[in-house]
C-alpha cells in the first residue's frame, strides 16, 4: 500500500498545484502518465440532459480494458455556481480515483446566471441517474457510485446523496428508481444556506439563491442539513479546514454531528489552519489516506483495487 499512497500524494499535489513545495517524484509521475496514456479512454461532452436551453455535458474516464462493472466517482466542480467555473478546470481532481482503477465522470451543471437554485442540484441528481441508466454501456457498478466535488460541487454531491426523492429535485429526470449513492466525499462543501443568504459577503449564496420571493424557504430546501436527520443515508466523509474564510468550518461540524446522531457512517478530517482548499501536500496525503480507508471500510473500495492500480 505504500506505493499506492505515494501515488495518491503525487496526484493530490497535481490536483492542488499551489500546495506543492517539493520536487515531484519523477518515477511516479512517469508511471502514472503512462497509465493514463495507455490504460484510460476518455469520452468527452456527452449530453446527459437539457434544461433552461442548455445542453448539460459530462466526460467519462474509464479503463480501456474494463470488462465488467467498476466503482465510479461523479465529480462536480466548485466555483460558487458561476459560469466561469467549468468541468474542464477540475480534471486533475479525478486522478486519485483513476489511479485506483475506477471509472470517473466529470460533470457540468447550470450556473447561477443561467438558472437559480435549485437548478444545479437538479442537474447533479440527473447526472447520477444518467450513470445508473447507462451502467451497462459504461461499466458502472450501480452499487458503488461515489459523489464528490469541491466547495459548491461538494454541496451538490451532498444533495445528490442525502436529499430524498420527495424533496422535488428530480423533475427534469423523472424515474421510478431512486438514486443509489454508495458514499459522499465532501470537500469543504456548504451544508446550510439559511445563515448565508442574507450575508452580502457570501456572494456565492446570494447570487445562487437570488432574489426569489421565497428565497429563505429555498435556502432551507437546498441545505444538506435539512435532509441529514433521515435514517439510511449513505456514508459521508468530510474534509474541511478550520480556518476556512469562505464556507464556515462549523457547517461541517454540524453536518457531521447530525448525520452521526441519525445513525449514519461518518468521518470528519479537520485540516488545522486550512483555508478554503489549497491545502499543504502532507495535509492532502492525510485526507486522501482517510478517504481511501473510509471507502474501503464501507465496502465501496477494496485494498486490492489500490494495489492493482499502482502495479499497472
Image (spheres, helix red, strand yellow):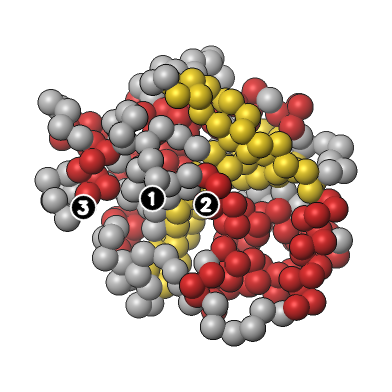
Whether residue 307 is situated above or below residue 158 in the rendered picture: below
Q: Kindly check if marks 2 and 1 are in contact, taking CB atoms under 8 A apart as contact.
A: yes
Q: Residue at x 32, y 60 (%)?
A: 253
Q: Residue at x 36, y 64 (%)?
A: 276
Crowding around mark 3 (Cα neighbors within 10 Å: few <14, some 14 to 19, many 20+) is some
Relative to 31, 187 lies left or right: left
Question: Residue at label 3?
Answer: 202
Tell me, for residue 89, which label it has, or none.
2
Relative to 37, 187 lies left or right: left
Camera-side residue: 206 or 176? Answer: 206
Q: Quadrant of residue 21?
A: bottom right
Q: Quadrant of residue 95?
A: bottom right
Question: Which percent across, then down, holds residue 180?
Answer: 57, 32
Badge 2 element: helix
Please indicate, yes or no, whether residue 257 appears anywhere in the rendered image. no
In three-dimensional space, the C-alpha distance between marks 1 and 3, rounded to whole angstroms, equals 13 Å
Question: Which percent across, then down, holds residue 203?
Answer: 22, 49
Question: Residue at label 1?
Answer: 79
Total numbered labels: 3
Relative to 44, 216 lies left or right: left
- Looking at marks 2 and 1 on the same chain, the residue that comes earlier in the sequence is marked by 1
Crowding around mark 1 (Cα neighbors within 10 Å: few <14, some 14 to 19, many 20+) is some
Nearer to us of marks 3 and 2 is: 2
Amino acid at each position: 500500500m505504500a506505493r499506492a499512497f505515494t501515488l495518491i500524494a503525487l496526484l493530490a499535489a497535481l490536483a492542488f498545484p499551489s500546495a506543492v513545495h517539493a520536487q515531484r517524484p519523477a518515477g511516479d509521475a512517469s508511471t502514472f502518465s503512462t497509465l493514463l496514456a495507455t490504460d484510460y479512454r476518455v469520452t468527452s461532452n456527452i449530453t446527459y440532459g437539457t434544461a433552461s436551453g442548455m445542453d448539460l455535458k459530462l466526460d467519462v474516464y474509464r479503463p480501456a480494458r474494463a470488462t465488467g462493472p467498476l466503482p465510479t466517482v461523479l465529480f462536480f466542480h466548485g466555483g460558487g455556481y458561476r459560469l466561469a467555473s467549468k468541468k474542464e478546470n477540475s480534471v486533475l481532481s479525478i486522478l486519485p480515483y483513476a489511479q485506483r482503477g475506477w471509472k470517473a465522470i466529470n460533470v457540468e451543471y447550470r450556473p447561477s446566471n443561467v438558472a437559480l437554485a435549485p437548478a444545479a442540484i437538479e442537474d447533479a441528481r440527473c447526472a447520477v441517474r444518467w450513470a445508473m441508466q447507462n451502467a451497462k454501456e459504461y461499466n458502472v457498478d450501480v452499487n458503488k457510485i461515489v459523489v464528490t466535488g469541491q466547495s459548491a460541487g461538494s454541496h451538490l454531491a451532498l444533495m445528490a446523496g442525502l436529499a430524498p426523492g420527495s424533496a422535488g429535485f428530480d423533475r427534469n429526470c423523472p424515474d421510478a428508481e431512486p438514486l443509489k449513492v454508495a458514499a459522499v466525499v465532501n470537500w469543504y462543501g456548504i451544508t446550510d444556506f439559511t445563515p448565508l443568504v442574507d450575508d452580502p459577503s457570501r456572494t456565492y449564496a446570494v447570487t445562487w439563491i437570488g432574489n426569489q420571493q421565497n428565497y429563505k424557504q429555498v435556502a432551507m430546501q437546498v441545505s444538506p442539513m435539512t435532509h441529514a436527520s433521515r435514517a439510511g443515508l449513505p456514508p459521508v466523509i468530510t474534509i474541511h479546514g478550520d480556518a476556512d474564510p469562505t464556507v464556515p468550518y462549523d457547517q461541517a461540524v454540524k453536518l457531521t454531528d447530525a448525520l452521526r446522531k441519525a445513525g449514519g457512517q461518518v468521518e470528519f478530517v479537520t485540516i488545522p489552519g486550512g483555508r478554503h482548499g489549497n491545502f499543504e501536500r502532507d495535509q492532502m496525503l492525510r485526507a486522501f489516506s482517510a478517504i481511501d480507508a473510509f471507502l474501503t471500510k464501507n465496502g465501496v473500495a477494496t485494498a486490492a483495487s489500490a494495489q492493482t492500480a499502482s502495479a499497472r
